Image (cartoon, rainbow, N blue to C red):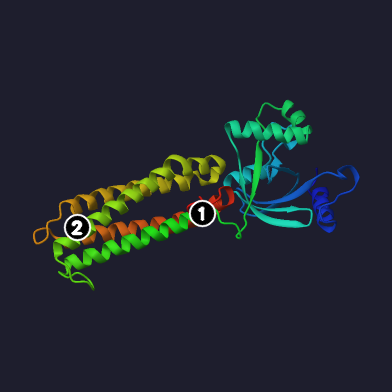
Amino acid sequence: MSNDFHSRLIAEFRANRGALGGRFEGWPLAVLTTTGARTGLRREVLLGYLEIDGNGVVVASANGADRHPAWYRNIRRNPMVTVEVGGDTYQAMAAIPQGPAYEKLFAKAVAEAPGYGDYQAKTTRAIPVVVLHRIDSRVKGMGDWLVEVHRWFRAELRALREQADALAEGRTAAIVRPEPDLAQEMRTRCLGFCTALRRHHVGEDSAVFPSLAEQFPALAPVIARLAGQHQVAAGLQDSIRELVDGFVPGESDPARLRAELERLAGELEAHFEFEEEAVVTALNATAPAPPTA
């Protein structure tokens, strides 16, 4: 299909709110706008469009060619896309299911449009199926839950730093208490904070992040960077817990404890900001918020 002919089809599609005549009459179609993997420019392509399990789906068949189409290579680099179908236009995250999820989805696609099975028979490559997860700010997702969790960690860490300040300055904030009581209170809070943070990061590394990296190949370097930040935070947590467990009022140096908490606060704030910028949209698009959010 020549570029001029393809451009005319897209223009006709938009002018007729998703309807085309001729040999395309009656076909369910969509215009998918991606970002060029090498150029960074907007790229538009007219594709067959399916709705499966409540999501838009497109198939990288390329008419059974042995090479993946350019639009598919684009979304492997940048999964943010724009979808135009009928009179509706929406932003989406383009996910690429793997393994059993892919097999099940491809079977459903062939059941709705048998031609995709014919295309698969023409090539040795496994034809990818892409799920277009609509980005809807009205629906709370796991990304929003993650932001709430980060807010709680920030508040707890702020309270720990205030307690460390009180110990370092020989006071008990607004409430006068014996220093040993404040040290014990801080020890209890630190234990809860460190346990919760470690479980949170282990959960991300073992379940949440591998799923994201599998669906969105472009996020793999981001996931690796986040995992490295988790390791740095874990090392600082171990140091802080050791200092807190061994803290003896009147003998231990609270300034050292306060300095380690400041280091952890700096690392975590940079981590939270990067994580929220990098994965919240993908999490919101693909997973609902947990019931306890």
285, 233: nearer the viewer: 285
Residue type (three-letter) at the residue carrying disc 1: Gly
247 relative to 23, above or below? below
Answer left or right for 7 relative to 138: right
Q: Quadrant of residue 248?
A: bottom left
Secondary structure beneath dot 1 equals helix
Pick the front one: 153 or 59? 153
Residue 108: image quadrant is top right
Left or right of residue 266, residue 5 in this image: right
Name of the residue lying farthest toward the bottom: 174
Is residue 98 placed above or below 146 in the rendered structure? above
* Residue count near mark 1 (Cα–Cα under 10 Å), binned few <14, some 14–19, many ≥20: many
- At 60% across and 38% down in the image, what residue appears? 97
- Residue 13 visible in this rendered orientation of the protein: yes
Which residue in the rendered view is the most extreme toward the left?
251
Identify the mark at residue 267; answer none if there is no mark: none
Give the residue at mark 2. Answer: 184
Disc 1 marks which residue?
143
Callout 2 secondary element: helix
